Image (spheres, rainbow, N blue to C red):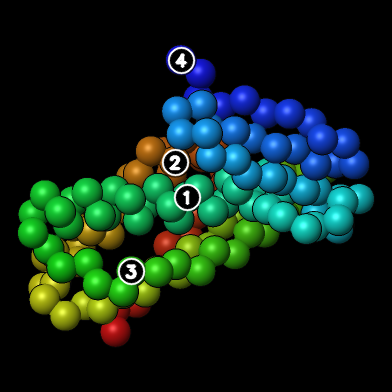
Amino acid sequence: MSTSTVRYLGDLRTEATHTRSGVTLVTDAPPDNRGRGESFSPTDLMSTALACCLMTVMGIRARDKGYPLNGLAAQVTKHMAADPRRVSRIEVDITMDGTGLDPVMREELEEVARTCPVALSLREDLVQVLRFTYR
């Protein structure tokens, strides 16, 4: 079974449909690349996928170990480079309530985040900066 189906809608816009669920999302080229910037760009999705993935694997580990994972959120900042145009750096600022998480638990969660499938699938020369803040 395929993962998704993607259609080009014209005017630098695509619509992707998740095969299993039928959920759709639209991408739009960013203004700095001749688009309207009215939705996620493909590189926005890639960068955001890193945060989604690391939070998912943190959630799996927390569930398996019974760790509290309260108020987990992330802010993603994507940096582009030219020649060739590409994402050169992704910064993910992760915040969460650290109550109930001792230093060993925190390190375990941070390590599982750093080694999530998306992080391990990105080019080695793409800089990934993960910053963890516990409130």
The residue positioned 31% from the left and 74% from the top of the image is 71
Q: Which amino acid is tagged 2?
A: Val
Q: What residue sits right under mark 2 in the picture?
A: 118
Q: What residue sits right under mark 1 in the picture?
A: 50
**Mark linked to residue 62:** none
Say what secondary structure mark 3 lies in. strand
Mark 1 and mark 3: Cα distance apart in space: 15 Å
Q: What residue sits right under mark 3 in the picture?
A: 72
Q: What residue sits right under mark 4 in the picture?
A: 1
> Nearer the N terminus, badge 3 or badge 2?
3
Residue 22's spot in the image, x, y percent?
Answer: 52, 34
Report whether 19 appears left or right of 30. Answer: left
Mark 3 and mark 4: Cα distance apart in space: 32 Å
Packing grade of label 2 (10 A; few <14, some 14-19, many >=20) is some
Q: Nearer the viewer, residue 102 or 26?
A: 26
Q: Nearer the viewer, residue 16 or 120?
A: 16
Mark 4 and mark 1: Cα distance apart in space: 24 Å
Packing grade of label 3 (10 A; few <14, some 14-19, many >=20) is some
Badge 1 vs badge 2, beta-carbon distance below 8 Å: yes
> Nearer the N terminus, badge 3 or badge 4?
4
Report whether 87 appears left or right of 62. Answer: right
Residue 20's spot in the image, x, y percent?
Answer: 45, 28
Packing grade of label 1 (10 A; few <14, some 14-19, many >=20) is many
Badge 4 vs badge 1, beta-carbon distance below 8 Å: no
93, above or below 33, in the image: below
Dot in front, 2 or 4:
4
> Nearer the N terminus, badge 2 or badge 4?
4
> Nearer the N terminus, badge 1 or badge 2?
1
